[in-house]
Image: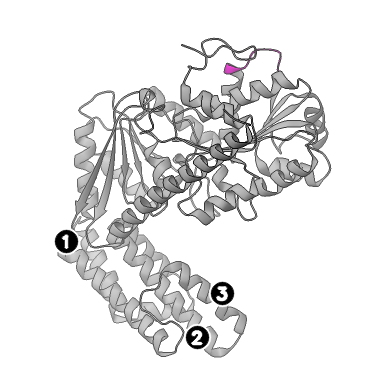
Amino acid sequence: MFVTHPWINSGTIEQRSYQENIVKMALTGNTLCVIPTGLGKTSIAALVAAERLSKNMKGKILFLAPTKPLVSQHYRSFEKMLKLGMEMQVVTGESKAEERFKLYKNVDIIFATPQTIGNDIKSGLLNLADFSLVIFDEAHRCIGQYAYVYIAKHYIQNAKDPLILALTASPGGQRYKINEVRDSLFIKNVEIRAREDPDVKPYVQSVNNDWVRVELPIPLKSVQTYLSNIKNSRIKKLMGWGIVNSSMVNKTQLLRLQENLAKKKTGSAYGAMSLIAEIIKADHALLLVETQCLSSLQKYFEKVSGETTKASTRLLADENFKNAIRLTNELVAEGKEHPKLEKLKEIVTNELKNKDARIIVFAQYRDTIAKISEVLSEIKGAAPVEFIGQAKKKGKGLSQKEQMQILNEFQMGFYNVLCASQVAEEGLDVVETNVVIFYEPTPSAIRKIQRSGRTARTQTGKVVILITKDTRDEAFHWSAHNKEKQMKKTLYDMQRKNVDVQKSMGEFK
């Protein structure tokens, strides 16, 4: 069964009760729609847009997404779903100001990045007074100084009949983060659906979760000990100076501490800042040996060896740091690596017994992604490809055009393993995958949900998470798990309260 609507092309949107219920609620007021990747957020947006067009043919619609590939993807989806007669256009900052001005006047539905729209509002090129709907994709970004915040405020203040539809797979793991998104987007209704919900279950496949634990071998534990000695001795010194109260300090706390010390502008404050820089560098090296791979650690040591800061100079003179570098170089020369890589190779080999398999391996760092791709290319039948974000300064990276080309080639089967960074988590239309592998757990509920959503859309899927025992991997895994659990509880509470209020007021039956 497909949706029938005057503005929707027949046979393009499957009739699903959970989508219909969300659309019905979204038309009563500004709505935050939280559903997993692959459950049709764009279809919901198209249905809400069609209803708004039916109500007011003169009202324009704005569809915002964080990146140009995502903007283009939504445009193509709407082009397929909505009937001819609607003038739709992608607007980018690359076109001239006068061209954009004409488009804003003449086009019914505009697809754009928030940076372009925010700048055009500020320059007076665009006014959202006549827009009857603004759709914010990846709405969890609507915090702080992000352009979504400014656009939403301008829209609510200026539009004659405003309506906001905010779409995300996860607005954040904690109540205060969810509330910040809600407040920034003037949200009245919260609509959440999970794979387990009765109205969603008929449309999703099951996901098998597998947590694979590996143990650090003794040589890597030795490197870990050298680096831990550095970190602990420096923290002990900070405690002696009364700058920190506990040895349990994380990177975020250390960076905040550095900022506060910088404001004091005293010799002792600068000394403490330099010591904190040493701790942060030693801790990053620890993270690499515990959770990533030795080749990433070796590259990091090479980077630090080329630095001339006081912190790096002191580290390079430290016997523990020298020993960590020496042992890492020896292990790499002997062909030794992190046990995760061997386990990953084993998992991928097994999955590729299915000739049509599509696999995504997510990893945090580009050096690790390069090593993963190199290791997996040794497997018979494997065709891995690196899929990373755009270049940062002198670093390597892929342009958005190159990213889209790789995704098309992955879909066509030229590649069967996508070795991906964070760029593949959010929104992009990645072909259905049989298996999603986390090379390391992520502490972020948002990222965990987005990664997992890359499988089990039309067929049973599998999520594999690699965890190094007795390292921060364990903590990150449980952190994301608890945040996701808390997020769902909070959102269901918000949804229930909204429905109760609307029913009592007779707005929604």
Three-letter amino acid code at disc 1? Answer: Pro
Is residue 67 placed above or below 76 in the rendered structure? below
Residue at 55 percent across and 9 percent down: it is: 10
Mark 3, secondary structure of its residue: helix
What crowding class fits label 3: few (fewer than 14 Cα within 10 Å), some (14-19), or many (20 or more)?
A: few
The residue beneath circle 2 is: 271
Depth check: give the residue in front, 137 or 103.
137
Stretch in magenta? 80-87
| In this picture, residue 49 sits left or right of residue 341 | right
What crowding class fits label 2: few (fewer than 14 Cα within 10 Å), some (14-19), or many (20 or more)?
A: some
The residue beneath circle 1 is: 217
Evaluate whether residue 442 shows in this view: no
Q: Is residue 303 magenta?
A: no
Dominant secondary structure (helix, strand or loop) of the stretch shown in magenta: loop
Q: CA distance from mark 2 to mark 3?
A: 13 Å
The residue beneath circle 3 is: 259
Choose mark 2 or mark 3, whichever is in front. Answer: 3
Is residue 415 placed above or below 321 in the rendered structure? above
Three-letter amino acid code at disc 2? Answer: Gly
